[in-house]
Image (cartoon, rainbow, N blue to C red):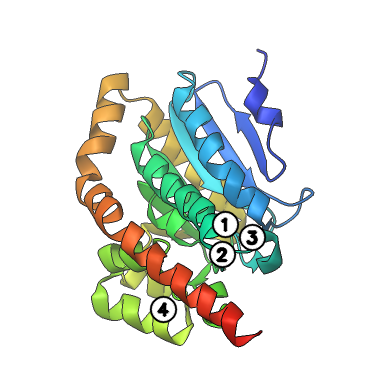
């Protein structure tokens, strides 16, 4: 079977799909753990749209490469985010990623194959979340840059883990391990590191075997509140994030 063109279209995303219709999306940089860049940020909404429009995809597995899901970021590659026009591009892309993860017409299984310290909300927005025993969670970039975490982290972590825990994690820049994430209700299962991806695919195959309309409508049913929160609160949060980015640039002049 010939793969669709988008399988080879994106620098930081590797795709493969099995006969059951389970699509595995692995984030990577040159075949190793991903360094998140402005190009990644720009490409992800388009990749998710193409995944959604491909009827051969019955379930999605989202994971990283090697021993980390996502824990490195190239800040300068995001561009002049302290300028309104540049930040509006970033804001629009960021909002689309969150919305499109929830709007996929198929179940998504997130597999944390290691540290998830950059955009951990991508995993939390999946319908099932499997963690390697080596997984850790937190927010590295925003505290390090001095920019408020208004790009969805604040909404998703609050919805999944609760207000007090979200505040503690995002204020302090601390990390939690997989066991704590399980106790907080952030992950569904912890498995040995070498088994994490296989377990994610196993769960995805179970979900892919369900009737097509059920898969689509169950996805909508179980994500109503998250969709409302993201639509309502992320634009305001990202406006505040843009202000802190502009203030940081001003202080450095």
Cα separation between marks 1 and 2: 5 Å
| Mark in front: 3 vs 1 | 1
Q: Position of residue 4 (x, y in %)?
A: 63, 20
Q: What residue lies at 60% left-to-right and 61% top-to-bottom?
A: 70
Cα separation between marks 1 and 4: 25 Å
Dot 2 corresponds to which residue? 83
Dot 1 corresponds to which residue? 86
Q: What residue lies at 21% left-to-right and 45% top-to-bottom?
A: 224
Question: Relative to residue 38, is residue 184 drawn left or right?
Answer: left
Cα separation between marks 3 and 4: 21 Å
| Mark in front: 2 vs 4 | 2
Cα separation between marks 3 and 2: 12 Å
| Mark in front: 1 vs 4 | 1
Q: Position of residue 14 (x, y in %)?
A: 67, 39
Q: Earlier in the sequence, mark 3 or mark 4?
A: 3
Image marks 1 and 2: residues in contact by CB distance under 8 Å: yes
Assign a secondary structure to mark 1.
helix
Q: Earlier in the sequence, mark 1 or mark 4?
A: 1
Question: Considering only vertical position in the picture, is 212 above or below 187?
Answer: above
Dot 3 corresponds to which residue? 78
Q: Residues within 10 Å of mark 3 (few under 14, many from 20)?
A: some
């Amino acid at each position: 079977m010939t793969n669709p063109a988008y399988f080879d279209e994106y620098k930081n995303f590797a795709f493969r799909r099995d006969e059951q219709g389970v699509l595995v999306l692995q984030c990577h940089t040159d075949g190793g753990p991903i360094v998140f860049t402005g190009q990644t940020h720009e490409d992800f909404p388009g990749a998710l749209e193409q995944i959604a429009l491909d009827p051969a995809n019955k379930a999605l597995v989202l994971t990283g490469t090697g021993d980390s899901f996502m824990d490195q970021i190239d800040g300068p590659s995001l561009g002049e985010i302290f300028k309104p026009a540049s930040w509006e591009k970033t804001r629009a892309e960021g909002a689309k990623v969150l919305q499109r993860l929830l709007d996929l017409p198929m179940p998504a299984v997130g597999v944390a194959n290691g540290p998830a310290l950059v955009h951990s909300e991508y995993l939390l927005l999946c319908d099932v979340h499997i963690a390697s025993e080596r997984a850790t969670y937190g927010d590295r970039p925003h505290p390090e840059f001095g920019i408020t975490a208004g790009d969805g982290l604040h909404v998703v972590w609050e919805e999944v883990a609760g207000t007090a825990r979200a505040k503690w994690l995002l204020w302090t820049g601390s990390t939690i391990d997989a066991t704590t994430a399980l106790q907080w209700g952030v992950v569904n299962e912890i498995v040995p590191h070498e088994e994490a991806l296989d377990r994610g695919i196993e769960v995805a195959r179970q979900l892919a075997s369900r009737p097509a309309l059920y898969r689509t409508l169950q996805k909508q049913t179980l994500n109503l509140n998250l969709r409302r929160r993201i639509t309502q609160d992320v634009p305001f949060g990202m406006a505040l994030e843009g202000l802190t980015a502009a203030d940081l640039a001003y202080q450095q002049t």
